[in-house]
Image: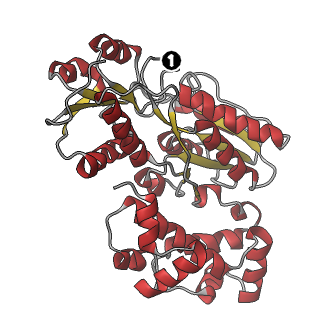
Amino acid sequence: MTPVSLSRPNKVALIFPLRPGPWPEIVRGVYRYAAKQDPSWQLALHTHDNSSVALAGNPDGVIAMIRTPQTADALAAWGGPVVDTGADLKTHPFPRVLLDSEEIGRLAAEHLLRLGPRRFAFVGNCESLAGDRLRAGFTARLGEAGQGCETPPPGAFDDPYSERPTSRVEAATWLSGLQRPAAVFASHDALAHRLIEVCGSAELRVPQDVAILGLLNDEFLCLTSQPPLSSISVPLAGMGYEAAQVLRGLMAGGCPPTSPLVLPPGEVVARRSTDGGAVADPQLSSALCYIHDHLDEPIGVDDIAQAGGVSRSSLERRFRSSLGRGPLAELIRLRLEYAKRMLIESTLSVKQIAAAAGFHDTRHLSVTFRAKIGMSPIEYRDCFRPV
C-alpha cells in the first residue's frame, strides 16, 4: 500500500448506518482524535447504504461500521486503507476495533446471577460476530454456575433498528412461556427497550417476573423505559478514537494489525429493570424506586424509610439483608455512579455534575469521590474520557 502524505490535509470518509444505534458516539471519538492528534483531517460522514458516494470523493482512508457484504466488497474493490468498527460480519479483510463481546456476556451473566434463582435467556442476532460472542460469554458463565440459557424462536424479535414490524404476539408468547422469575440479557438497549414494552403488553412485571439487562447504556432508551433499563456501558467513543489512530498508521504506510484491537467493557449501570429487591420485598422496592426518582434531591434515610412505609431500623435491616449495604451507602453509591457517567459522557463542569448527582457542593463530591474511587473527579475524567 502506497503511504498517504501526512504533510497535507487528508480526507477521511466515515461510512456508518445513519439510523438509531451506537454510531454517533463512535463518530464522536473519531472527531476527538482528529481535533487532538491531527486537526488537518477533513472528515466527511456518509451512510453505508451508498458507500459509492463516499469513495467517489477519493478519500485517503475510511473508518466504517461494516454491516453488509456489499459494503465490504465495495471497500475491498476500492483498495485503500479501511478500519472497521462493526461486528456484524464474521469475516472480512479489514482491521477492526471491537468490544470484548465475550467478556461483556460474562459480565451480564454475573450481574443477573446475583438476582438469585431464575430462568436465564439471551436475545440477539447470533448470526453476527458480536451476537455470537455475546451469547458464548453469557452461556459460558451461566454454565459455570450450573445454569442454562434459552433463546427465542426465529422471528420473535426483529431488528428494532429496521423498519420491519416486530411480531409482538410471538414475542409476548415466548416471554410468557419462560419459567418465572426469569432474567433476559439483550444484545443492545433497543432490543431491551422493546422487551420491556412487550412485557407490559403481556402483563409481565419487570423485574419481578422478568428482569431485563441491555447493552450500550444508551441513556435515552434506558431512562425512557418503564421501568428504567439496566445496561452495560461500553467505550464507544474510545472505539472511534482508537480506530482513527489505527487508520493514521495505515495511511502512513504501516502494516495492518494482525488481530483486532479489542476494548474492554465498562460496567453494569444498574437501574430498576434488574432490581433484585423488588422480587421478594415490595417495601424495599418502593424505597429503591424513591432513591432513583429523587437522586438529585437532598433526601436522607428517614425520607427513604417513609417512602418504603417502614421504620428506619427495619429499612436498615432490609437493605443489608438484600443488598449487603445500608440505605445511605446505596444512596451514595448511586450518586457516585451517576457522577462517573456524567464525567465521561458529558461536558458539564464538576460543579454542575455535583448538583445533578445530589451532592451538597463540589467539595462534597470531590471528598466522596476521592474516598470511594481513589482520585478526584477531574482525574477520573482525564483518565477515562477520550479527548
Instruction: Give the percent coordinates (x, y) of residue 340.
Output: 48, 66
Give the vertical position of 11 relative to 236 (above or below).
above
Quadrant in the picture for residue 50: top left
In the rendered structure, the answer to whether residue 50 lies left or right of residue 269 reads: left
Identify which residue is drawn at 51% across, 84% down.
Answer: 367
Position in image of residue 66 (x %, y %): 39, 25
Q: Nearer the viewer, residue 308 or 103?
A: 103
Q: Quadrant of residue 172?
A: top right
Does residue 170 appear anywhere in the picture?
A: no
Residue 309 at x, y = what percent?
67, 81
Q: Quadrant of the C terminus?
A: bottom left
- Within 10 angstroms of label 1, few (less than 14), some, or many (20 or more) residues? few
The residue type indicated by label 1 comes to Thr
Frontmost residue, 2 versus 266? 2
Q: Please give left or right for residue 109 compared with residue 5 in the image.
A: right
Q: Is residue 217 above or below residue 22?
A: below
- Which of the two residues, 139 or 220, is positioned nearer the viewer here? 139
> Which corner quadrant of the image does residue 65 belong to?
top left
Q: In the picture provided, is 239 more to the left or to the right than 58?
A: right
Residue at the (51%, 40%) spot, across then down: 188
User: Considering the image in quadrants, where does the N terminus appear?
Assistant: top left
Q: Which residue is mark 1?
A: 91
Q: Can you say whether 214 is above or below 149 in the image?
A: below
Snapshot colouring? secondary structure
Q: Residue at x 59, y 59 (%)?
A: 270
Q: Give SS at disc 1.
A: loop
Residue 181 in percent (x, y) is at 75, 48
Q: Residue drawn at (81%, 37%), measured in percent from left and top?
A: 143
| Residue 182 versus residue 45 in the image, above or below | below
* Residue closer to the observer: 42 or 153: 42
